[in-house]
Image (cartoon, grey):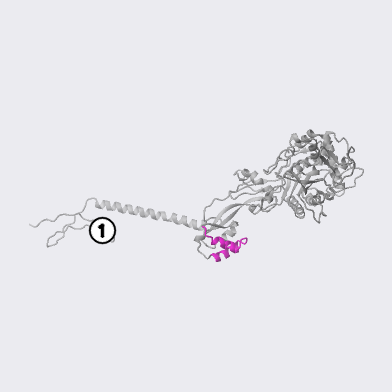
């Protein structure tokens, strides 16, 4: 009897083709070792069919899920290609950019600073696909402010990342993007633009690459300009761009003509304290502050202190009127010879060598006469007057760039200091201090803190009294007399009834007077019968020129520029010239006044 063969299990493996293969199984028959080789009958295995059907369902579900996932992935990629790589308003590289920021406008709504959408163009030189020279030539044709050599240098740089250009307009960015170079990237940036370039640069300031204000108003109002709640509302200033342009033009002309070390100018509304123009020379372009030096970014109108010389005599005369030291215009003081006080000798540059009344002292700018009046006023009353004018502290103002005045400590403020301060020596203030003081001098005696923000019509204006109204009336007449008959004659602007005072003082450096170097200043107001505006123009170390006939004094350098300035800005500010109108000066007119230059 033949031996029965040992049994072995059927083997299952996947194939493809037949219906049975779709079931995932092929039954392998039993075979015998006999000679006949007759096939053994097939024996089905329990549960195999159910397992095969479950596996097939799993595969179908996975295939279906993959099929459903493909369209969204394709859609996302198409969006990336069409929006983030093709459109000029998108970027290929996610980089942080400066946030939006509120505009700054002048009193009439003219833009002084605004934020616009720009692009930065960068490159990864190592990934460059095209010919660098050809690409540089094509980019240079789009970015005309860049040379082909400059662009080629960036494209062939050995670094991994380089900027080709910043602050690129969207239209230019699109043209560069259309070149199709995959190694060039566009980055959207919110850029701060100053459309008037250098105009009022010391007032407006500038921001850094992250959009934060660095100096001036951009820094002082940084939170307000960047806040979501106020970003849509422009910051409106008291400045008038037309007046600002005129002031900068006239002051810059004198600054260049005199080859001066610096200059500053201010135009202020005497009724509100609004600063309608302010400049410092040299100035800078806030669109590219890094290209300017420290001297150009230094605001001499608010941050530099000077001895402003004889312009201070107006405050001494006003104080004398208020305190009763000057009971009438005809009281006289001895100016027959230089005044000796201790080891100090006070003299007049253009000595008349006689007793002088108040108009004589003022229009001839007598140091001796003014020193004697200050001596009678005394230290305490002088300090009180200067304190009310804000001359003993930083001026209250929006800009952070402000300096404290320099003056003697109370222990050293004796008789000599009182006398010299009376005519503007021994005390240093900023031109802004002087402008605010002159506004109080001519507006009826009220000091208004200066402001760079526009004051709404009818709004209350803070202020306090410094001089009596009658004193202010008298000072207006005396200031007018200086222009009609004294050292400020070249400041006359026909029809505008200009009044003012010259001031020429030796420059102080490291606590010492620098012989041969002057600070020349002219403080003026117009129209003097009903003052509306004060102008202050100061020039640091004028050298003399053909236009000033070699003179460096305020009466020959700054006074003529003041005349041209007032003629230009008068109509803009609503002050129309009237050739037939003038002030009655009979109460202050001296009996004899041979005008002399300061």
Crowdedness near tag 1: few (<14), some (14–19) or many (≥20) residues, C-alpha within 10 Å = few
Quarter of the image that includes the N terminus? bottom left
506 and 179: which one is in front? 506
146 drawn magenta:
yes
Image-based side of 9 in relation to 464, left or right? left
State the extent of the magenta-drawn residues as a range: 132-159
In the figure, 489 relative to 355: above or below?
below
The answer to which quarter of the image holds residue 317 is: top right
Identified at 12% across, 62% down, the residue is 36
Image quadrant where residue 333 sits: top right
Name the foreground residue: 153 vs 245.
Answer: 153
Tell whether 31 sits left or right of 514: left
Q: Taken as a whole, is the magenta stretch helix, strand or loop? A: helix
* Image-based side of 124 in relation to 465, left or right: left
Determine the residue located farthest toward the front in the rendered image. Answer: 343
Q: How far across and how far down the image is residue 123, in percent? A: 53, 59
Q: Position of residue 71 (x, y in %)?
A: 43, 56
Q: Could you say where residue 24 lies in the image, as x and y percent from the top left? A: 27, 56
Q: Is residue 469 visible?
A: no
Identify which residue, 440 or 349, lies in the foreground. 349
On the image, numbered disc 1 is attached to which residue?
A: 20
Q: Position of residue 370 (x, y in %)?
A: 84, 40
């Amino acid at each position: 009897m033949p031996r029965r063969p040992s049994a072995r299990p059927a083997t299952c493996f996947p194939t493809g083709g037949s219906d049975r293969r779709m079931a995932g199984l092929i039954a392998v028959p039993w075979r015998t070792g006999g000679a006949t080789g007759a096939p053994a009958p097939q024996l089905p295995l329990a549960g195999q069919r159910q397992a095969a059907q479950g596996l097939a369902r799993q595969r179908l579900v996975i295939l279906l899920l993959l099929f459903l996932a493909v369209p969204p992935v394709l859609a996302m990629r198409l969006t990336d290609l069409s929006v983030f790589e093709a459109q000029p308003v998108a970027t290929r590289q996610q980089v942080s950019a400066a946030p939006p920021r509120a505009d700054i406008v002048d009193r009439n709504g003219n833009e002084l600073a605004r934020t616009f959408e720009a692009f930065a163009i960068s490159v990864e030189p190592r990934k460059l696909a095209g010919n660098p020279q050809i690409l540089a030539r094509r980019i240079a044709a789009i970015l005309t402010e860049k040379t082909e050599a400059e662009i080629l240098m960036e494209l062939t740089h050995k670094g991994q990342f380089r900027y080709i250009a910043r602050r690129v307009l969207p239209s230019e960015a699109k043209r560069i993007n259309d070149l199709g170079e995959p190694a060039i990237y566009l980055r959207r940036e919110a850029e701060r633009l100053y459309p008037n370039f250098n105009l009022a640069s010391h007032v407006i300031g500038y921001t850094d690459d992250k959009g934060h204000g660095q100096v001036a108003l951009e820094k002082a109002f940084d939170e307000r300009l960047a806040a979501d709640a106020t970003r849509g509302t422009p910051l409106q200033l008291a400045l008038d761009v037309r007046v600002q342009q005129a002031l900068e033009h006239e002051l810059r002309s004198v600054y260049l003509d005199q080859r001066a070390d610096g200059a500053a100018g201010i135009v202020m509304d005497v009724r509100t304290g609004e600063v309608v123009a302010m400049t410092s020379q040299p100035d800078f372009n806030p669109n590219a502050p890094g290209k300017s030096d420290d001297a150009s970014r230094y605001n001499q109108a608010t941050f530099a202190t000077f001895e402003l010389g004889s312009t201070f005599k107006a405050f001494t005369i006003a104080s004398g009127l208020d305190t009763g030291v000057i009971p009438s215009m005809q009281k006289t003081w001895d100016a027959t010879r230089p005044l000796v006080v201790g080891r100090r000798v006070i003299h007049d540059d253009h000595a008349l060598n006689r007793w002088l009344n108040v108009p004589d002292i003022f229009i001839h700018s007598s140091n001796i006469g003014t020193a004697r009046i200050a001596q009678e006023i005394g230290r305490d009353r002088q300090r009180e007057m200067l304190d009310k004018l804000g001359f003993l502290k930083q001026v209250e103002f929006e800009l952070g760039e402000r300096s404290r005045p320099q003056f003697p400590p109370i222990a050293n403020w004796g008789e000599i200091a009182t006398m010299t301060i009376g005519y503007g020596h021994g005390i240093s203030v900023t031109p802004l201090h002087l402008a605010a003081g002159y506004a109080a001098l001519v507006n009826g005696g009220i000091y208004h803190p200066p402001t760079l923000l526009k004051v709404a019509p009818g709004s209350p204006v803070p202020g306090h009294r410094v001089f009596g109204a009658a004193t202010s009336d008298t000072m207006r007449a005396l200031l007018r007399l200086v222009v009609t008959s004294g050292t400020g004659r070249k400041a006359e602007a026909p029809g505008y009834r200009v009044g003012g005072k010259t001031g020429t003082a030796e420059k102080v450096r490291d606590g010492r007077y620098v012989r041969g170097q002057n600070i020349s200043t002219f403080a003026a107001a117009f129209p003097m019968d009903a003052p509306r505006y004060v102008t202050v123009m100061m020039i640091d170390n004028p050298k003399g020129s053909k236009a000033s006939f070699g003179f460096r004094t305020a009466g020959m350098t700054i006074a003529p520029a003041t005349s041209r300035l007032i003629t230009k800005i008068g109509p803009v500010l609503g002050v129309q010239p009237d050739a037939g109108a003038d002030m009655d000066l009979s109460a202050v007119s001296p009996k004899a006044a041979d005008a002399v230059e300061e």
